[in-house]
Structure formats: C-alpha cells, structure tokens
Amino acid sequence: MATKSNVSQPNLANWCRGEGLDQAHAILVLGVSEEEEISTVEETLEQVKTLGKVRVRGKMFDANNQTLTMLCECRQEVDPTKVPPEVISFREGGKWKIVVAEQETNSDLFTEKLDRFLHDEGKTLEDVKRLCDPSTSWNSNPESIIRAVGDVLQSKPNESQSYRRFRIFSGVHPTPPGEDNLDSWLEQVKFMTDEYECSDKEKCRRIIESLKGPALEIIQAVRMSNPMANHMDYLQALESTFGTSESGEELHLTFRAMHQRQGECLSNFLLRLERLLNKVVQKGGLQVDEANRARLEQLIKGATESDFMLLQLGLRDKRNDPPTFLSLLKEI
C-alpha cells in the first residue's frame, strides 16, 4: 500500500473538494521539481497501469522542501493496494512520493482481513488477543499480532475448530449458484471427515450446518427415525435420495463407454474417468484391486484425441503393471 507522507490525508480530501474532484480518482504527488514539465509528470504516472490516464489538476509550492506538490486526476479508480509509494521521474530521475486516499484506516483493514483469515481456519480474534502481550493495545503492534496468529494456528484445535466449514448443499436441481452438486459436496465431506480427528457428534453437526432445503429435511427425518444415526448414516441417506439409482454394473458399463471430448486435454479426461471409477468401486461394480487396470485400459481406449501423447508416455506397454491414478496423472 502507498505509504503516508508528511502531507496528511485530509489535505487530499480538501483539495479534491475545492477542485470538484472525486477523491477515489485522485492522488497527490510530492517532491516534483519546479522545472519539471507537467506532461512529463503525467507520462511518468501513466506508467503505473492501475491509474490509467492521468491529468495534473493543480499544484502547490512546498516551501520546506522547495518542491511542488501536485494534485492529479486518474481515469481509473485508485486502488491503494496497487499504487507504489513512489515513482521515478523520466527526465530528471528524481523520486516523487505518492499519497492516496485511505478508503479504510490501516487498522480497520488489517483487522477485517485477519478476522476473515482466522474464520477460514476455524479460529477467532479472541484466540489471538489472548496470546498478545497484555501491555500492547490491539492493532498497535502488528508484529506481536502476527506472532500470536502463528501460535494460535500451531495450537491443538478443539473439536469445533478442527476443520473448515463444508460447502452448501440443498439437493435442489439444477444446482443454485453458490452451492455444490451432490458429487462435489460428498467428495469434500468424505475427505474432510476422514482427514480430521473429532467425534462423530461433531461431524454430524458440521454436516447439518452445511445443509438447507430438501437435503436438510431428509436429515431431519433421519434424526427423528433414528436419534443415534451417525454421520455415515446421514451421508448414505443423502446419497440414496439425491444420487444416481444406477447399480455398480450399470455404472461400470457407463465407465467403459467414456471417450475423450473434442478439445479436452488428456489430464481432464483422466479426472473424469477417475470420478466415475470411484463410484463404480463404491457401488461394487469393480473390485478395488482391479481399478488401476480398468483406469489404464479405458484411458487408452477412450483417448481419441491424444494418440501421440499415449505413444510418448508408452502407456500401452504398461498394461501388465498399470500405474496408480497419481502416478498416471503425474506422467501425463
């Protein structure tokens, strides 16, 4: 973010008001030589792409530094995070400081970003404040706060903070914006519930927290009929209600008919194969120890647009010892 200079932020606001400028499209340039051409100032500032076209709208003599301070209007709205603290003049090589309007105070912006980051990590600002030096007021020492954040993230999480929130699933079709379809939602939930150690009660709570609409109604019915239902019962009920009714054998036939789409790269085709192959195995249409061979065979058979790559990788020669999904993906 552009640094503050000895010119206070209200000067920019007052000057803009006097000139009838929108403060969001204005900057102050400090330290400009009296001999500097206005056109040079404008051309130099326009090298900062985020400003767009720049026009000098006023100038004021700084008696302390014997230089000019200029008010400039920018075509683009000024983003304080993308404006450099200073620029170098094309002609004279002198450094000019840039002052921008603060849309938020630094402390407010820092706190907002920190709060958002901690929320994603399952933590709160209170967790950080407890580890900060009591003699240091909040936001007055960013280094102390950053150290406290590191300590909080390294600390052992409790059950309610052990992983991020699941994405939203409602069971509505077509899938509303901002929600996941069943396959994507199940993939995330199964991975995260297997990855983190917490009680089944906490896993159930997290699942319910991510549901709404018809999907939530299904789980409410499950809880009424079986108060002791675990999180796997919840997932099975949702999969049975909103998932495919095809058997493992039917899914296997669909898998064996898959082909590369026009313009689809080989790695994306492999990912599509893998998603369906996982369903085939889960439904009992194929044994786990047969998955590597089935994946490779269908990749070779269905890759109608990547014959040259198949030759380069020598995949046809690996049928007797088929690689795992990760090895295959890495090779491709």
Image (tube, grey):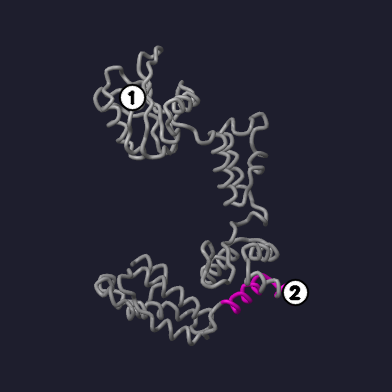
Question: Between 267 and 242, which is closer to the camera in this rendering?
Answer: 242
Q: Are marks 2 and 1 in contact (CB under 8 Å)?
A: no
Q: Secondary structure at mark 1?
A: strand
Q: Is residue 235 left or right of residue 283?
A: right
Q: Earlier in the sequence, mark 2 or mark 1?
A: 1
Any mark on residue 95, and which?
1
Give neighbour class at mark 2: few <14, some 14-19, many 20+ (Cα, 10 Å).
few
Quadrant of image for the C terminus: bottom left
Q: Using the numbered discs, state the Cα–Cα distance from disc 2 to disc 1 in whole angstroms.
A: 72 Å
Within the image, what quadrant is residue 266 found in?
Answer: bottom left
Give the residue at mark 2.
224
The answer to whether 173 is drawn above or below residue 96 in the figure is below
Range of magenta residues: 222-242
Residue occupying image coordinates x 33% and y 33%: 54
Residue occupying image coordinates x 33% and y 74%: 261
Q: Please tell me whether residue 225 belongs to the stretch shown in magenta.
A: yes
Q: Secondary structure at mark 2?
A: helix
Q: Callout 1, which amino acid?
A: Lys
Give neighbour class at mark 1: few <14, some 14-19, many 20+ (Cα, 10 Å).
some
Numbered-mark total: 2
Residue occupying image coordinates x 53% and y 36%: 104
